[in-house]
């Protein structure tokens, strides 16, 4: 074997320096090996009397992991049951019952009940949905008899995957909805991959997706630094993790376990996944309440205008128009509204034919930008120019707005290189101004 | 008034030209056909009838019949002989008969795949059967990808896409892999060297996946003329192959003419520039509206010739009737040029070897090559662009003053008598094999007794377990790593750790313009080196060896740089030896230690040395295969000093000769002479593959040793210089009769 390694190193041209380094690290490794060997002997001693495949290290039991067997084989399973009054951050788990009907807006014509939702979160050995990325841990969650149940499976080696998938397949059939965070593009396609790789039926379940990453992005894209679940839960769900093992470390910890068989470091991964599952349930509650338009019965409405508008826009897209109007009004009347928020709402009003408010919002956006004429004010000016030209045929007013936009754009473009987009914009403004001047002249004549 | 001349008149006129040193005629051949087989679907037959095809050429017929028997085929087809029907007919027939059948087409480039799709869809439309064919490459929009995966009967792609996007995501392609009936590999001859060795492994992975989903596809390969199409196809696919070479396409009379520009400086053996001669020759044809293709070896050369020709004939035919064609043109522009050539609206085209591949431009009347294209196979392919099914055609090769060109034109029998080169691959190259075993294990867990090519790979699997890339459980090796292996492996690059070339001429727009293997980079990308990229000069500002990056800036200088490399060779293993009376030829593994020392600045016009500088880079070691010649006894009258010079001269000749004989680039195989080799203390000449682990070139030299030596002798003998010039043994060394002595040395080998 060392012969092959030497040859590989020679062909790769790994320099002597590197060889020396690896020798050093080998020497260090030797010490580790010793302690590892000790650990292993102790494990071996404990397991001395077993040729029994059903034996598992007692360490597992310290965090509630048991061996599970089915017709296909065995794997490890951890089951946690939360009482219905358990609170995770701002929400109590029992709110899921009240919230669930709202979630049916994700899939019109479907009714939904808390018992029909399965929560899913995978811990995998890598990134992406390639065939070599293996979910070593599958977390599922569901409501059962007014309790919230989380089940987490772990495979002790890749050959146990089949038994684990068979267990999952059996569970899936009882549910209609699959609630995830990015599960539509990641977790679920990966599960399908594994079904195919293990020769199981791949069409056994067609879930109705509740992928909360999408609404989270719609609503918090600009208000939160990141839309990662751990960030969203902290900022908006009132959840604070302590001693959390970051998800990105999970693969490494699992490989370590594969190499030395020591379960202890995996406890952190179980806990991390468990919190993810709970947060997922809270997101379902949060979005369910919003869609039921009664969120104020549980938590206050958002206090940032940008978030108000984005939440309203999302609700409208989901077919809910009551609460959205309230949110829009709140945003308009809020003290500090960014021009960008105003024009976002104005674009919505323009599309809906509500010109009165749209014009108001554009004007407001320009007024608020007086000290710093930015992209939002530019857009508002152009929109107003179009409005005055086409709707009111007031060419002089239109000319005023177009000229303002042009001047600012020109000044702005002096400061940086003009790219194709900027040149096109300047050209179109030039054309608009010329046309308006013609029209204006004609009108006078 | 200008009266147009016909091609025959121009041919007669050309025969009197004193610079023509060989005139070869290829006789016309009538079409050989057979009826379309009974078993072909009526809808396909009628679609073929609509296109005027009522019978098949013999090779198309044999291809079809052989495939019906379930055998794999490799069809060798010259340009424009109806190659595509060799695979389209059986594939369309299979899908017409069973809608669930799938086929995968592999083309070496995206452009060829696009062409093929258009052609295929035309015939499918005429058939009136709902057969979906799609290209799948980097340009395919995400929206359509899903449709291609699920519903595409024929998926047209390239090996790189297969390697990095399709195979690692095979679960998305269940309907393709589960029902794959045919795999088409077009332009088989392009899969050679490092690229071919990679692709052979990609195909092993492909076959593994097919097996997983229960399909066992038949391979249909087509190739230009090379010496070993069947061997290459079998090595590449791992399947036994039936060779189809009974070409039945008709062709008219073809004149194949070698033109050697006149010598303008006798002592230095300098000839008139080939480019100038090409301009004048091509102009005659274009003025007379005879459709002509001019091949040039670089993109820059194409542009130079193009602008000259456009200027020369703009009065007669208008400059828009002459177009350029090369990599870097937009696809739309290319399609327009191809169509113009087919319709006859474009009279002349100047191209790089981009038009050597199977792009359909119809058949032209005259082909002019600026210099020898580098291999017999390439030459025939370019020559194939001229030649209509009826009527005469002319192929004109204008030699440059490089030794290879001069050797070819002065030894026409070498070119015409000799079968074309063999295409070599070495899929067992350890680095390449290990790379693809990683990918394979990522795709599907690897069983201990599983085969992957002819070697037992269990050792490698165990090595990968030690490297913590795989995890072994009982008899299965599982992928156990966070990485995505395919993304780090490029099928087209020479070695793993390439030096990336970063152009920072425009500070606001720093971009990567290329990459180079680390061994070549030592002498071509050191600090202050002048690096030529597409004809533009760049100077290396900084070579960051540790991070393998070379930062360059565009310059305009009057010199180029030439680095000295101190090379040490150690023989590790001797695999084969042929002992002769006073010499021995060996083949085996060597370690090459390379240390660049200094570089010289050499003036472009006069080759004067105008300066030099040091290179400080660490020594690099290359392990590879080599063939070497040892001189066990040397005529004692030749002094050591002279012998050293003679060896250097012979090495110079071999540098030119070897690439012609084993079909590779000059940079792929290196030749080094030593007056006292480390392992034997004997005078020795080494020829080694310039790729870690070797790719089979040195082995080929060993096999063809006598042929190579004979060619070397001939080159020296036929060179018109007095006693040595850069075209043969290098610069003249006074008073040692180097040419005669070199030939004598070679006689003894």
Image: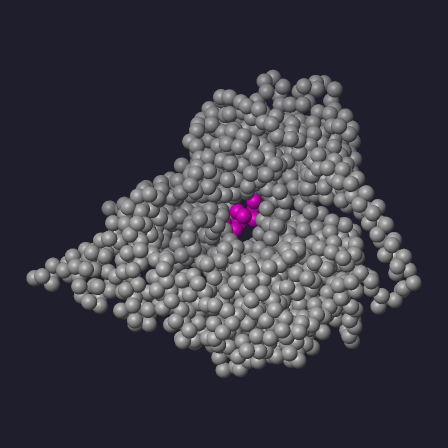
Residue furthest left as drawn: A445
Question: Tell me, what colour scheme is on the image?
Answer: one colour
The magenta stretch spans residue A385: no
- Determine the image quadrant of residue A62: bottom right
Q: Main secondary structure of the magenta part?
A: helix
Q: Nearer the viewer, residue B505 or B683?
A: B505
Point out the stretch of residues depicted in magenta. Answer: B375-383
Question: Looking at the rendering, which quadrant does residue B642 occupy?
Answer: top right
Q: Residue at x 77, y 54 (%)?
A: A259
B349 up-or-down from A297: above or below:
above
- Give the side of residue B618 with respect to residue B81, left or right: right
Residue at point 28% right, 46% down?
A: A411
Q: Position of residue B22 (x, y in %)?
A: 50, 41
Q: Residue sitting at 58 percent across and 62 percent down?
A: A239
Image-quadrant location for residue A269:
bottom right
* Residue B515 in the image, given as x and y percentages of width and height: 55, 42
Q: Is residue A211 above or below residue B504?
A: below
> In terms of depth relative to the viewer, which is nearer, B445 or A158?
A158
Q: Answer above or below: position of B489 versus A266.
A: above
- In the displayed structure, does residue A315 sit left or right of residue A82? left
Q: Residue furthest right?
A: A49
Q: Quadrant of the C terminus of chain B?
A: top right
Q: Position of residue A277 (x, y in %)?
A: 63, 67
Residue B602, percent across and down? 50, 25
């Amino acid at each position: 074997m060392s012969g092959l390694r030497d040859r590989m190193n020679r062909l790769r041209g790994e320099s002597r320096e590197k060889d020396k380094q690896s020798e050093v690290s080998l020497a260090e490794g030797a010490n580790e090996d010793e302690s590892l060997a000790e650990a292993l002997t102790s494990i071996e001693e404990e397991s001395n009397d077993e040729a029994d495949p059903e034996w598992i290290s007692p360490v597992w039991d310290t965090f509630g992991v048991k061996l599970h067997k089915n017709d296909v084989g065995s794997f490890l399973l951890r089951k946690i049951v939360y009482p219905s009054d358990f609170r995770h951050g701002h929400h109590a788990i029992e709110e899921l019952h009240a919230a669930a009907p709202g979630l049916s807006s994700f899939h019109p014509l479907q009714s939904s009940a808390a018992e029909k939702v399965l929560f899913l979160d995978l811990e995998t050995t890598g990134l992406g949905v390639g065939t070599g990325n293996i979910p070593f841990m599958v977390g599922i969650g569901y409501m059962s008899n007014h309790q919230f149940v989380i089940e987490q499976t772990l495979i002790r080696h890749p050959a146990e995957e089949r038994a684990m998938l068979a267990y999952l397949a059996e569970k899936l059939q009882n549910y209609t909805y699959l609630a995830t965070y990015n599960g539509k593009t990641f977790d679920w396609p990966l599960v399908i991959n594994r079904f195919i790789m293990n020769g199981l039926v791949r069409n056994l379940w067609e879930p109705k997706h509740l992928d909360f990453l999408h609404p989270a992005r719609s609503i918090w894209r600009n208000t939160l630094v990141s839309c990662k679940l751990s960030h969203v839960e902290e900022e908006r769900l009132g959840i604070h993790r302590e001693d959390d093992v970051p998800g990105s470390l999970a693969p490494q910890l699992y490989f370590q376990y594969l190499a030395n068989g020591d379960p202890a470091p995996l406890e952190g991964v179980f806990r991390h996944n468990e919190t993810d599952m709970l947060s997922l349930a809270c997101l379902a509650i949060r979005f369910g309440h919003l869609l039921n338009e009664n969120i104020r019965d549980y938590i206050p409405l958002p206090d940032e205008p940008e978030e108000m508008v984005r939440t309203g826009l999302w609700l409208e897209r989901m077919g809910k128009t009551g609460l959205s109007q309230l949110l829009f009004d709140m945003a308009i009347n809020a003290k500090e509204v960014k021009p960008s928020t105003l024009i976002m709402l104005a674009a919505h009003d323009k599309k809906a034919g509500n010109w009165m408010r749209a014009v108001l919002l554009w004007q407001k956006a320009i007024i608020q930008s007086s000290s710093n004429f930015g992209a939002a004010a530019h857009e508002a000016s152009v929109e107003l120019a179009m409005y005055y030209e086409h709707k009111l045929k007031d060419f002089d007013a239109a000319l005023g707005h177009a000229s303002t936009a042009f001047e600012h754009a020109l000044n702005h473009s002096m400061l940086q290189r003009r790219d194709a987009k900027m040149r096109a914009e300047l050209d179109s403004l030039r054309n608009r101004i010329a046309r308006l001047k013609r029209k204006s002249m004609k009108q006078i004549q | 008034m200008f009266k147009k001349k016909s091609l025959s008149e121009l041919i007669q006129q050309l025969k009197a030209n004193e610079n023509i040193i060989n005139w070869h005629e290829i006789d016309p051949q009538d079409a050989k056909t057979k009826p379309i087989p009974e078993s072909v679907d009526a809808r396909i037959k009628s679609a073929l009838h609509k296109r005027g095809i009522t019978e098949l050429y013999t090779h198309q017929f044999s291809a079809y019949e052989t495939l019906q028997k379930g055998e794999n085929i490799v069809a060798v087809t010259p340009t424009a002989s109806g190659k595509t029907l060799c695979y389209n007919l059986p594939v369309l027939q299979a899908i017409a008969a069973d809608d669930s059948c799938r086929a995968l087409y592999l083309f070496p480039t995206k452009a060829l795949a696009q062409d093929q799709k258009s052609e295929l869809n035309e015939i499918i439309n005429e058939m009136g059967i709902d057969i979906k064919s799609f290209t799948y490459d980097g340009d395919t929009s995400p929206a359509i990808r899903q449709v291609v995966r699920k519903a595409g009967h024929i998926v047209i792609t390239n090996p790189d896409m297969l390697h990095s996007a399709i195979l690692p995501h095979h679960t998305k392609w269940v309907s393709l892999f589960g029902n794959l009936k045919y795999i088409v590999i077009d332009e088989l001859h392009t899969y050679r060297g490092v690229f071919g060795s990679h692709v052979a492994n990609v195909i092993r992975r492909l076959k593994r996946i097919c097996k997983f989903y229960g399909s066992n596809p038949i391979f249909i390969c087509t190739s230009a003329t090379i010496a070993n199409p069947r061997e290459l196809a079998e090595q590449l696919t791992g399947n036994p192959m039936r060779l189809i070479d009974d070409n039945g396409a008709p062709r008219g009379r073809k004149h194949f003419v070698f033109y050697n520009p006149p010598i303008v400086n006798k002592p230095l053996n300098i000839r008139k520039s080939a480019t100038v001669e090409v301009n004048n020759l091509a102009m005659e044809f274009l003025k007379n509206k005879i459709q002509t293709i001019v091949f040039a070896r670089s993109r820059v050369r194409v542009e130079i010739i193009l602008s000259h020709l456009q200027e020369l004939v703009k009065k007669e035919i208008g400059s828009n009737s002459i177009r350029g064609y090369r990599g870097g043109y937009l696809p739309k522009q290319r399609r327009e040029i191809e169509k113009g050539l087919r319709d006859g609206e474009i009279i002349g085209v100047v191209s790089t070897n981009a038009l050597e591949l199977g792009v359909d431009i119809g058949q032209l009347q005259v082909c002019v090559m600026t210099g020898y294209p580098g291999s017999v196979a390439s030459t025939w392919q370019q020559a194939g662009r001229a030649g209509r099914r009826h009527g005469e055609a002319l192929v004109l090769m204008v030699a440059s003053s490089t030794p290879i060109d001069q050797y070819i034109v002065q030894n026409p029998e070498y070119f015409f008598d000799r079968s074309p080169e063999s295409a070599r691959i070495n899929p067992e190259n350890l680095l390449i094999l290990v790379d693809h075993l990683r990918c394979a294990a990522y795709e599907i867990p690897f069983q201990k007794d599983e085969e992957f090519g002819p070697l037992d790979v269990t050792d490698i699997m165990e090595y990968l377990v030690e490297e913590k890339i795989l995890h072994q459980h009982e008899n299965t090796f599982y992928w156990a790593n966070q990485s995505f292996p395919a993304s780090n492996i490029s099928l087209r690059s020479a070695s793993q750790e390439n030096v990336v070339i970063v152009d920072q001429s425009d500070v606001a727009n720093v971009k990567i313009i290329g990459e180079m293997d680390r061994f070549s980079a030592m002498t071509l990308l050191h600090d202050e080196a002048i690096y030529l990229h597409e004809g533009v000069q760049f100077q290396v500002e900084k070579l960051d060896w540790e991070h393998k990056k070379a930062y360059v800036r565009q310059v305009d200088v009057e010199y180029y740089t030439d680095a000295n490399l101190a090379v040490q060779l150690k023989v590790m293993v001797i695999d084969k030896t042929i002992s002769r009376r006073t010499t021995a030829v060996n083949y085996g593994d060597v370690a090459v230690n390379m240390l660049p020392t200094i570089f010289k600045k050499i003036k472009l016009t006069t080759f004067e040395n105008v300066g030099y500088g040091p290179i400080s880079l660490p020594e690099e070691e290359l392990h590879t295969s080599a063939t070497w010649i040892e001189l066990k006894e040397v005529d004692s009258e030749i002094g050591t000093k002279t012998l050293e010079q003679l060896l250097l001269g012979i090495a110079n000749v071999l540098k030119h000769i070897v690439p012609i004989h084993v079909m590779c680039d000059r940079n792929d195989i290196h030749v080094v002479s030593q007056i006292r080799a480390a392992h034997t203390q004997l005078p020795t000449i080494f020829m080694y593959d310039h790729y870690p682990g070797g790719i089979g070139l040195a082995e080929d030299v060993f096999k063809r040793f006598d042929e190579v030596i004979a060619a070397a002798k001939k080159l020296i003998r036929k060179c018109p210089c007095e006693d040595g010039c850069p075209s043969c043994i290098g610069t003249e060394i006074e008073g040692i009769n180097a040419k005669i002595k070199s030939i004598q040395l070679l006689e003894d080998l």
